[in-house]
Image (cartoon, rainbow, N blue to C red):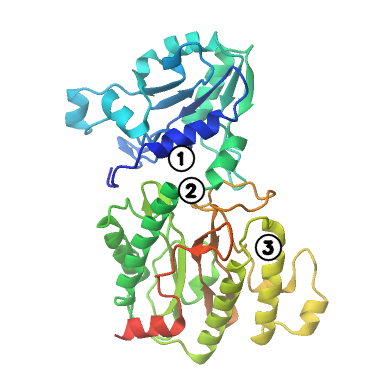
Amino acid sequence: MKYLPIDSSLFVQNRKNFTAQMKPNSLAIFNSNDIYPISADSTMPFQQHRDIFYLSGVDQEESVLVLFPNCPKENHREILFLRETNEHIAVWEGEKLTKERAFEVSGIKTVYWLKDLEKILFELMTQCDTVYLNTNEHYRSNVETETREARFIKWLKDKYPAHSVAKSNPILQRLRSVKSAIETDLIQTACNITEKGFRRILGFVKPGVWEYEIEAEFMHEFLRNRSKGFAYTPIIASGNNANVLHYIENNQQCNPGELLLLDVGAEYANYSSDMTRTIPVSGTFNERQKAVYNAVLRVKNEATKMLVPGNLWAQYHVEVGKLMTSELLGLGLLDKADVQNENPEWPAYKKYFMHGTSHHMGLDTHDYGILTEPMQAGMVFTVEPGIYIPDEGFGIRIEDDVVIQETGDPFNLMQNIPIEADEIEELMNS
């Protein structure tokens, strides 16, 4: 792995938190992701399933975690099953986890090779009543590919039809949404790498550069700082491309006088960062661009103050809508009649700001979190208002990542990334 070793106490505590919420006499099973094929003998780069990583720190394919806190055998209360490594595999594919190294990473003492899974699992299943299965219930999930986890669940249900089943996901949704100090530090590292990338491109962008060249500059800086690369597919959107919310082609030339919307973030140790900045291609905002930019920034700053314990996500967005409506009136994009006659289901401001303001962030860019439950200290949220004006040829979005605190304003993990229009201009022209 490119990233530095993570203190195994993180994963030890995560398992304790999870097993504390399991039913009596139950076990839980978690699988690694598949390595997905492209064609011929080509495969996509491996990405570990975030749940098994969260609970074990194992960042390797063909791994299985079993948790059975009430198991009669103490050494079977936490078990890792790993693909057996040998000299041949080490030569052709690189080093895989040994049993000793797996213990150092995870804090789990009992490690078996994967070939022993069915035999040992049979013994465990005779001793438990309920099995926790790990299904994907994220509110944005739309998975068509059958995952390794899904195949395993079908096999297990067929093999052991008399067992009761329970869901791991509701427990993980709550646990993963509140970050520990170690996790916050890892996210901070990802944000720091993103900052380095952004400062690099401020000296690079000028009329005539191509969006993909800017993407390459970010990737260069991310890789040289121990990141695998982007936490999500980057958006490098010049001019009117910024008005396509998920523009990812990144294949257009940046023209004089245009704005450039950059929605990018580095990953670090599987943890995400998520930043958006909008900068002037020529190094200077015109008067109208700066007025809209500052309006978006004011909404972001005021919205951030609302991310406090006890607030509800849905009501938060209602209040942000009021802030945005006021700014759009001031910019002349809405008038009082637009607001008075608006559809409550799709308020007038949605014409220019049609997406949400915040989402949970962590191991996944759109991380776990139950949106109907109150915000808590330790949650990490993005704050990303925008104003999109196709008729004027530009769109502006500004985004930071913040941690909710017990008291006071959230802590901004991106506080050192340039954000004021004047500072951006100064850095671009220095």
Distance between the alpha carbons at the discs numbered 1 and 3 = 28 Å
Q: Check whether the beta carbons of the residues at disc 1 and disc 3 lie within 8 A of each other.
A: no
Label 3 SS: helix
Looking at marks 2 and 3 on the same chain, the residue that comes earlier in the sequence is marked by 3
Evaluate if marks 2 and 1 touch, with contact meaning CB atoms under 8 Å apart. Answer: yes
Estimate the x, y position of residue 365 in percent, counting from the top left.
49, 52
Quadrant placement of the N terminus: top left
Q: What element does badge 1 sit on?
A: helix
- Residue identified by numbered label 3: 316
Q: Nearer the viewer, residue 232 or 363?
A: 363
Which residue is found at the position 40% from the left and 60% from the top?
191
Badge 1, how many Cα within 10 Å: few under 14, some, many 20+?
many
Q: Is 333 displayed left or right of 121 in the figure? A: right
Residue, x 17% and y 24% (percent of image)? 87
Q: Residue furthest front?
A: 407
> Which disc is residue 364 wearing?
2
Give above or below for 96 relative to 382.
above
User: According to the image, label 1 marks what residue?
Assistant: 50
Dividing the picture into quadrants, the one containing residue 230 is bottom left
Q: Secondary structure at mark 2?
A: loop
Q: Position of residue 275 (x, y in %)?
A: 45, 64
